[in-house]
Image (tube, rainbow, N blue to C red):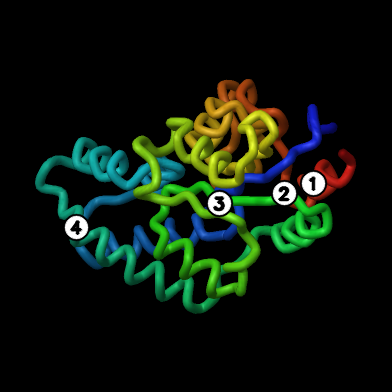
């Protein structure tokens, strides 16, 4: 198992790839729904993963109806998530080692996420990682979110590296679609959602964790 070429840069997704945060989001949205008194299920939450907030808001209103208490849920969800994250937002296995390796090799890296800049900054600051990335592309930086290629194309532009020379790391289906359509080498590290046949066809590789990515990058 090898990469087709040496990457000149690496673009990370954030939630579920760099941070083990999707489980916290899942737990907190179910807690929030109980508090607000509205419908929500784990299966519905999984359909929100890797998509922009605008798309997710429309999906929830379409799925549950126009009278769904969306804003109350969002506010309560955010409060419960921050409480969980404050206790400890864990890095995914191999993340610290991969960042150290990229430092060693002198490879630039960026984050491409559907989250806001404030959320990215808060997460990176909590673990002392603010200075470990050369660029952050977040909500508001692109015309269309994942699965559009825009977030990854913007990240490549900010790093000054051609998309074909970038290695994209993703955990979600829409993230994989976004990175692959941007023309990047795309590795999926599944988190809550396994790869489908469609997603396997789009990926350069599918691996179990970021420790494996370290080996792939080092071997090139």
Which comes sooner in the sequence, label 2 or label 3?
3
Q: What's the distance in space between the residues labelled 4 and 1, CA to CA? A: 40 Å
Q: Is 107 left, or right, of 203 in this rendering?
A: right
Residue under circle 2? 209
Residue 11 image position (x, y, % from top left) = 61, 45
Q: What's the distance in space between the residues labelled 1 and 2, CA to CA? A: 6 Å
Q: What's the distance in space between the residues labelled 3 and 1, CA to CA? A: 19 Å
Contact? badges 1 and 2 (CB < 8 Å): yes
Residue under circle 1? 212
Residue sitting farthest toward the front: 160
Contact? badges 2 and 4 (CB < 8 Å): no
In this view of the protein, which residue sits in the foreground, 17 or 83? Answer: 17
Image disc number at residue 111? 3
Which comes sooner in the sequence, label 3 or label 4?
4
- CA neighbours of label 4 inside 10 A, class few (<14), some (14 to 19), many (20+): few
Q: What's the distance in space between the residues labelled 2 and 4, CA to CA? A: 35 Å
Q: In terms of secondary structure, where does tag 1 sit?
A: helix
Using the image, determine if residue 192 lies above or below residue 81. Answer: above
Q: In terms of secondary structure, where does tag 2 sit?
A: loop
In this view of the protein, which residue sits in the foreground, 172 or 149? Answer: 149
Placement of the N terminus among the 4 image quadrants: top right
């Amino acid at each position: 198992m090898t990469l087709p070429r040496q990457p000149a840069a690496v673009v990370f997704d954030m939630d579920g790839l760099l941070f083990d945060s999707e489980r916290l989001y899942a737990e907190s949205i179910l807690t929030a729904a109980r508090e607000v008194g509205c419908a929500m299920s784990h299966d519905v939450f999984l359909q929100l993963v890797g998509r922009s907030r605008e798309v997710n808001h429309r999906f929830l209103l379409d799925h549950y109806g126009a009278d769904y208490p969306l804003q109350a849920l969002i506010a309560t969800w955010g409060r419960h998530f921050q409480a969980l994250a404050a206790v400890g937002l864990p890095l995914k296995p191999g993340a610290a080692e991969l960042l150290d390796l990229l430092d060693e090799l002198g490879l630039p890296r960026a984050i491409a996420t559907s989250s806001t800049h404030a959320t990215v900054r808060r997460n990176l600051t909590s673990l002392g990682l603010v200075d470990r990335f050369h660029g952050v592309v977040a909500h508001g930086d692109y015309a269309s979110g994942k699965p559009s290629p825009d977030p990854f194309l913007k990240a490549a532009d900010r790093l000054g590296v051609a998309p074909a020379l970038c290695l994209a790391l993703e955990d979600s289906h829409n993230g994989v679609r976004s990175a692959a359509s941007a023309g990047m080498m795309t590795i999926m590290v599944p988190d809550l959602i396994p790869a489908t046949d469609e997603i396997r066809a789009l990926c350069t590789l599918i691996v179990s964790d970021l420790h494996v990515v370290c080996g792939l990058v080092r071997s090139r």
